Image (cartoon, rainbow, N blue to C red):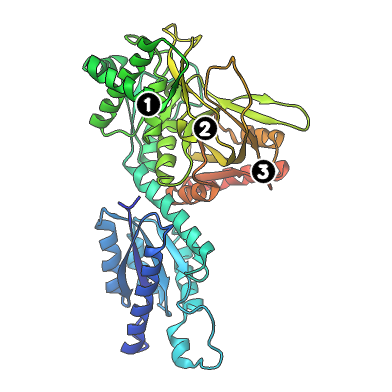
C-alpha cells in the first residue's frame, strides 16, 4: 500500500494578506503531517501546498494527473476559496478526490476570538462553496467531515485511501483465462471490453496447452522443493505424494505464467483440462494466499474482484477468498449458509492449520486432486459479487457473520459457515432480486464502507444488504436505481 501517494492541497486566496496565508500553509502542513504519520495510515500523504489562484490550482491538479505515483487527492478549503477558480483544474482532473471538511482548531476560543481568527478559520463556509461547485460539475468524490485528529474521521479517510488504491490497482489489472467459462452458464459471461473501459481489467484467454508449456518446464527438483515447503506448513492427511507434487508443479507453472503475462488473476474450468492430470486445487489456494485473484469455471469477473479485494485489504488482519454459496442449514431458529467450492478456497481465512488431502472430485474426468482443508475463523465479514447487467455493472454486497465450523468428516473441501444479515431469508431473497451471482468474494479484512467507496470511485452501481434491509424497500430501491442508471448510461 505504501506505493500509493495522496496529494494534500489546501485552498485559499490572496484576500487576507501574507500573514494569514503563512498560517494557512503552516496549519495545512501540520494536518497533512498528522494524517501521514498516523499508525493506521495505509499509504502516504504528500503535502503540495496551498492553492490561491486559478493558475496555481490548475497546475497542481495537472501535476497530480501526470504523477503515476499519485493515487488520489485530498482537498481542504482552510479559508474561503472562490470556487470558480477551481473549475478549469477540476474539469480535467482524473484522480479520485476526497473533500476533507475540517479545521485546524478543535474548539472556538471564546475569550479571544476576533476577526483575524475568523478570517483564518473559514472552512465552515469555504468548504460549502467548494462542495457546491463539485456538485454542480457532477464530480464523484468522498466527503469526510470532522476534526482531523478524530479517530472516526481518520478511519473514514483511510478506508477511502484503500478503496482509491484498489481502484488504481484495478486500472492496471490483467486476468488470464485458462480455457473458457463453464458451458451454458449465464452469470460467468460478461462484456470484457466494457469491464476494461469501466474498471481497467484486461481479460484475455489462453489454451490449456499454453499452461502445459509452462508446466513442462518445471523440473522435478523444483517440485520436490515445493513439496518439502508444504510439509513444513501443513498437516498431511494423505500418502499420495505424487498427486500433491503434481499440484506443486501447477503452482510453480501458474505463478511463472502469471508473472510473465503481468497478470494478477486467473481462471480455470473443470471442462477444459486436456493435457492436465488434475484440476488445479491446492495450487490455486496457494496462489490466492499470495495475493492472486481466482475465479472458477472461467469466472473472470470474480477472479478480478478477488484480486482487487485482496489488494484493498493489504496488511490488514484476516483474508479474502473466492467463495460460493453452496447449501443451507434451515432449522427455524438456526439458519446459516455453508460456503465452499470443489477445491479453491483461500487459506488466508483459516482458523486452524490447513491440512492437505487427496480425494476424488467427481467431475472433470481427471485424477483426484490435492487440496487444503480447513474451517474459517469466526467473525464479521462481507461477501461481494460483480454482475454485468448489459448497460452497467452492479456490485452487490452482503454483511455476514462467520460462525464456528462444524464437524463434516465426509466433506473433503475447505468450508465456511455464515449467518447473513438481516436473515438468511431476506438476504437470499434480496440477493436473487438484485441478480447476484452464486460466485462471490468473501473478505474478513475490509467492510462494506471500503466497497461503497470503491464503487463510487469506479462509478458503478452499488447495492448493499445489511441488518437494516427491508425487502419491500430493497426491491423499490432496485427499481429506482434501474431508472437512474439507465438515465446515466
Q: How many circles with numbers are drawn on the protein? A: 3
Mark 1 touches mark 3? (CB < 8 Å): no
Q: Is residue 275 above or below residue 458?
A: above
Q: Residue beneath label 1, please?
A: 232
Residue occupying image coordinates x 46% and y 35%: 348
N-terminal label among 1 and 3: 1
Task: Please tell me how crowded label 3 is: few (under 14), some (14-19), or many (20+) other residues with Cα within 10 Å.
Answer: some
Residue occupying image coordinates x 52% and y 24%: 414
Q: Residue beneath label 2, please?
A: 440
Residue 283 image point, x, y percent: 37, 23
Q: Is residue 34 above or below residue 116?
A: above
Question: SS class of the residue under badge 1?
Answer: helix
Q: Is residue 118 above or below residue 84?
A: below
**Disc 1 to disc 2, C-alpha distance:** 31 Å
Residue 247 image point, x, y percent: 36, 17
Report the mark closest to the observer, 3 or 2. 2
Q: Is residue 118 visible?
A: yes
Q: Kindly identify which numbered label has been placed on residue 471.
A: none
In the rendered structure, the answer to whether residue 378 lies left or right of residue 173 reads right
Q: Is residue 195 above or below residue 42?
A: above
Task: Please tell me how crowded label 2 is: few (under 14), some (14-19), or many (20+) other residues with Cα within 10 Å.
Answer: many
Residue 383 image point, x, y percent: 55, 37
Q: Residue beneath label 3, please?
A: 474
Question: SS class of the residue under badge 2?
Answer: strand
Amino acid at each position: 500500500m505504501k506505493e500509493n501517494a495522496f496529494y494534500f492541497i489546501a485552498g485559499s486566496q490572496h484576500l487576507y494578506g501574507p500573514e494569514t496565508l503563512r498560517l494557512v500553509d503552516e496549519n495545512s502542513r501540520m494536518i497533512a503531517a498528522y494524517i501521514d504519520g498516523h499508525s493506521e495510515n495505509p499509504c502516504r500523504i504528500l503535502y503540495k501546498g496551498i492553492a490561491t489562484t486559478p493558475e496555481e490550482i490548475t497546475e497542481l491538479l495537472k501535476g497530480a494527473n501526470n504523477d503515476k505515483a499519485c493515487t488520489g487527492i485530498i482537498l481542504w478549503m482552510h479559508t474561503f476559496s472562490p470556487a470558480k477558480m477551481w473549475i478549469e483544474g477540476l474539469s480535467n482532473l482524473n484522480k479520485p478526490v476526497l473533500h476533507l471538511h475540517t479545521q485546524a482548531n478543535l474548539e472556538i476560543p471564546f475569550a479571544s476570538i476576533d476577526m483575524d481568527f475568523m478570517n483564518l478559520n473559514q472552512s465552515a463556509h469555504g468548504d460549502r462553496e467548494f462542495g457546491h461547485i463539485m456538485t454542480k460539475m457532477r464530480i464523484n468524490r468522498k466527503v469526510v467531515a470532522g476534526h482531523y485528529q478524530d479517530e472516526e474521521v481518520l478511519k473514514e479517510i483511510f478506508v477511502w485511501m484503500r478503496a482509491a488504491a484498489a481502484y488504481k490497482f484495478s486500472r492496471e489489472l490483467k486476468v488470464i483465462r485458462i480455457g473458457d467459462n463453464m458451458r451454458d452458464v449465464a452469470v460467468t459471461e460478461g462484456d470484457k471490453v466494457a469491464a476494461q473501459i469501466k474498471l481497467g481489467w484486461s481479460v484475455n484467454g489462453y489454451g490449456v496447452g499454453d499452461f502445459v508449456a509452462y508446466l513442462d518446464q518445471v523440473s522435478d527438483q523444483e517440485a520436490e522443493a515445493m513439496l518439502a515447503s508444504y510439509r513444513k506448513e501443513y498437516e498431511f492427511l494423505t500418502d499420495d505424494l505424487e498427486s500433491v507434487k503434481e499440484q506443486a508443479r501447477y503452482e510453480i507453472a501458474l505463478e511463472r505464467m502469471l508473472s510473465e503475462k503481468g497478470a494478477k488473476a486467473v481462471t480455470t474450468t473443470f471442462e477444459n483440462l486436456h493435457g492436465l492430470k488434475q484440476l488445479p486445487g491446492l495450487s490455486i489456494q496457494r496462489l490466492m494466499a499470495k495475493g492472486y485473484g481466482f475465479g472458477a469455471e472461467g469466472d473472470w469477473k470474480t477472479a478480478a474482484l478477488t484480486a482487487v479485494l485482496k489488494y484493498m485489504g493489504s496488511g490488514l488482519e484476516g483474508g479474502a477468498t473466492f467463495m460460493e454459496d453452496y447449501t443451507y442449514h434451515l432449522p427455524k431458529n438456526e439458519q446459516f449458509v455453508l460456503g465452499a467450492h470443489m477445491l479453491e478456497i483461500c487459506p488466508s481465512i483459516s482458523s486452524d492449520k490447513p491440512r492437505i488431502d487427496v480425494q476424488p472430485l467427481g467431475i472433470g474426468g481427471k485424477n483426484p486432486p490435492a487440496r487444503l482443508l480447513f474451517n474459517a475463523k469466526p467473525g464479521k465479514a462481507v461477501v461481494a459479487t460483480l454482475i454485468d447487467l448489459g448497460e452497467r455493472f452492479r456490485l452487490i454486497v452482503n454483511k455476514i457473520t462467520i460462525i464456528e465450523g462444524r464437524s463434516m468428516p465426509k466433506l473433503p473441501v475447505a468450508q465456511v459457515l455464515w449467518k447473513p444479515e438481516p436473515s438468511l431469508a431476506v438476504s437470499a431473497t434480496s440477493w436473487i432480486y438484485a441478480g447476484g451471482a452464486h460466485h462471490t468474494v468473501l473478505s474478513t479484512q475490509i467492510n462494506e464502507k471500503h466497497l461503497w467507496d470503491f464503487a463510487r470511485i469506479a462509478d458503478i452501481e452499488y447495492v448493499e444488504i445489511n441488518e437494516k434491509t427491508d425487502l419491500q424497500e430493497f426491491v423499490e430501491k432496485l427499481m429506482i436505481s434501474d431508472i437512474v442508471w439507465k438515465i446515466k448510461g
